[in-house]
Amino acid sequence: MKVVYIADIGIEGGATKSLIELVSTMKNEHGVEPIVLTSGNDRLNESLSALGIENHSVGHGAFLQGAPDSMWKKPIKWLLYAAYYYLHYYSSIRKAIKVVDWKSVDLVHTNVARDDLGMELSKRTGVPNICHIREFAELDFNCWSYRPHYVKYLAENTDGFIAISDAVKEYWIKKGIPKDKIKVIYNGVDYQKIQRADHSRWKTDETIKMVIVGGVIPNKGQYQAIEALCMLPKELQPHFTLDVIGGITETYKSKLKEPLKKCGIENQVRFLGACNDVYDRLKDYHVGLMCSKAEGFGRVTVEYMHAGLVVIASDCGANPELIQDKQTGLLYNRESVKLLADSMAYLWEHKEEMGNLADKGQEETKKYTKQKNAYEIYKEYGRFMEKR
């Protein structure tokens, strides 16, 4: 089976990690011949080439874009990305048709619902297409669309969808995607590369080390995590540290530091920026925070769990599908920062339970591996091709 994968124009974040793991596993374990069409020619192409995966840069833009944090940047981004999208629309289609032998292709798989290249190639070649839905769009990234009625466009020009959680599926059904076109297949991660935490000294450790991983933007909840840290009782604050891992602007970093300075605990929070060695770092922490407003799945959540960390997660998006409160982690109502602070305090007061919570969470992650993810998608390819 030959499958053409359409990569998102952005190469940072969980969607691209998932794509790399998916195509390599499809090739090595299921005999799929993958071809990846990227927008730019960058380290994503280098990573794919290193894995022996055919890839081509075709320069496509995205019709769906997330709004920047600052309001003054929004019109600038709107204009720049619109110009890129419209200027490269037809040229990217022509390049894609030229670099691939479409008579031998069985399926087109678009990695995110922001890109329409796969749909347009399907129209022109007759090759069926499926699309991965990995986010809530407007809800989590305040997205706008250069296509009017874009949900209708997706529904009418895509043969099938894969949603990464029940929460994502239900959200998009309400937006207008036919429910009989969507199949839920949970994401997986390459857990064998993740270093495990040593729980043996947790009961006697005098500091609980917390980490929050992901792009540092308002909807990911880093500010809420810092507010909760400042809300802890004064006698508990010295026993907690927080590392913020993820790309961040200097403007937003300054905003995050403000409550820390007022509280006098700025030395207990570090901003480490984007790190390529997160899997090696996780073992050094006790707690992983997932404070997102709307997390479609939460690769980071599962990475925490694979690493043997206790997860404190908001009750939003797919988090309740991954975490059972006080069984495999802790859930809190995101509307209340105090409840997040209470969850932190709970772990200090019940340190003897932390290892048990982490162990049960780690056991739960057997459901979320790249092998299981690829196998379920491969089966979906087969069912899809049979229906066709």
Image: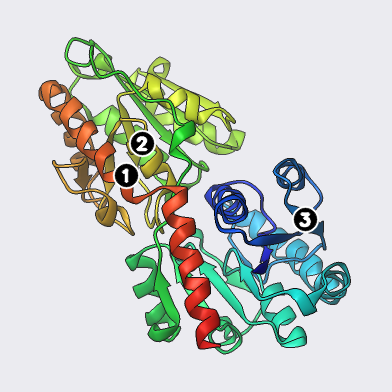
Contact, CB < 8 Å: mark 1 with mark 2?
Answer: yes
Spatial CA distance of label 3 from label 2 is 30 Å
The residue carrying mark 1 is 365
> In the image, residue 243 lies at what x, y percent?
43, 25
Give the side of residue 14 with respect to residue 308, left or right: right
Spatial CA distance of label 1 from label 2 is 6 Å
For label 3, the crowd category at 10 Å Cα-Cα, with few meaning under 14, some 14 to 19 and many 20 or more, is: many
Circle 1: element type: helix
Please tell me whether residue 218 is drawn above or below residue 356 in the rendered image: below
Going from N to C along the chain, the mark reached first, 1 or 3, is 3
Residue at image point 60% right, 37% down: 249
Residue 306 got which mark?
Answer: 2
Going from N to C along the chain, the mark reached first, 3 or 2, is 3
For label 1, the crowd category at 10 Å Cα-Cα, with few meaning under 14, some 14 to 19 and many 20 or more, is: many
Spatial CA distance of label 1 from label 3 is 31 Å
> In the image, residue 250 lies at what x, y percent?
60, 33
Residue 146 sits in quarter: bottom right
> In the image, residue 196 lies at what x, y percent?
37, 25
Circle 3: element type: strand
Q: Quadrant of the N terminus?
A: bottom right
Q: Amino acid at mark 3?
A: Asn
